Image (spheres, rainbow, N blue to C red):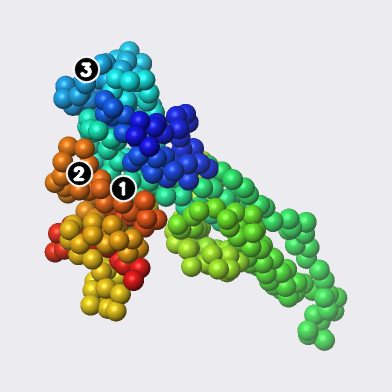
Amino acid sequence: MTGNAPPFGVWPGAVEFEAGQRLLMELTHWTPPGGVVSVYLAIDPGDRGEGWRIELRDQLEDVDEAAARRVLERFPSDTPTHGRTHIGFLEVDGEAREVWETVQVALQRTEVVQRRRPYVTPLMRILDDGWPVGVVVVALERVRMLEWVLGEITELDGWEIELPDLDWQERKSPQRNPQAGGTGTTASGRDQHAQRLEHNRDRFLKQAGELVAAQHGDRPWRRIIVIGDGDRPRLLAAGLGAKRKLVHEIRHDLIRAGAPEIGARVGEEMVHLNRTREEELVAQLEQAIGSDVGAALGLEEVLQVLGEGRARHVIFDATRSWDGDDSVPAGELMIERALATSALVTPVEGLAATALAAHGGAAALLRY
């Protein structure tokens, strides 16, 4: 497939996440004769001095001059730039094809690299951290269904309970004291009404959970984040059926919040959830060592089992600089072979990367 370019156009929107995964695979096979300049531009929205422009110019000094000029033309100094991360792949010479996309997942730093093929490790990290999750915001009488992906949030659906008898009507009843005359009021009617309301609201939240599972259960969500006060998240989760195992609850009232505020809260939680997921994965690796199936430890073993098609899940330190030739560094080769053999790939950082250092920063869970 030498010289073939990946599909160019809009990628990946909130519901086209799988297209981004396909693009990742296709990029590993795109090898135009003149090579590719890969751009990962990190922009801090709070940096009014636009220091990112200086960083971008500095890094462009080490790549093809014509490609660098094309990059700078995309970010003119007199035009506002939106988005936290800009990703670009530019063919050097040849047909000068290129693909660009903007996502809201933050990068730690700007990187510009020219190699024989695209540099995809940062893209793998972005896709892994920005994996789609369902977001359900619950209140007593209202439920909102949203989806968070790659730092952006979209409202998908919503339901409200219909209670035509919300106003409780006080009724008269005979007094218990037979010596007293007339009639009096009782709390029983009020209590019964309150119980009916509570029952209906509980049933509504459970039914809303059933609607989430029925209408959106086929979406590729890694987690379902349910946000609400008290036991409302638990009540909705009860209706999710098999999807309940994906639930992560946040005790907070955001039912009247705008989508951007909800998205910001979810983004904060995703940082924690991603690091926790990576730590749990490394713990699984430690348990697999010495088991019947076992695990591959270190770069050399991981590349070997990938070549044999035995790797089920590759785990590597996303912050490490891997040795290799100029065309395919070792870290890129792990990703390429994993994608070719349908193995899962998880770049890790933080505590998980620290734990993985004992195994040379790379390991794999095996199929057999």
Does the rendering let one see residue 224? yes
Q: CA distance from mark 2 to mark 3?
A: 23 Å
Judged left or right of residue 164, residue 278 is left
Specify which label sits upstream in the sequence, 3 or 1. 3
Q: Position of residue 112 (x, y in %)?
A: 23, 30
For badge 3, the amino acid type reads: Glu
Assign a secondary structure to mark 3: helix
Instruction: Give 204 or 22, whichever is nearer the viewer.
Output: 22
Residue on which disc 3 sits: 65
User: Can you identify the residue that label 2 sits on?
Assistant: 329
198 is higher (above) or lower (below) than 334: below
Which residue type carries mark 1? Glu
The answer to whether the residues at label 3 and label 1 have Cβ atoms under 8 Å apart is no
Q: Nearer the viewer, residue 188 or 175?
A: 188
Residue 286 quadrant: bottom left
* Label 2 or label 3, whichever comes before in sequence order: 3
> Identity of the amino acid at label 2?
Pro
| Side of 161 relative to 29 (left or right) | right
Picture coordinates of residue 305, whole percent (x, y)? 27, 62
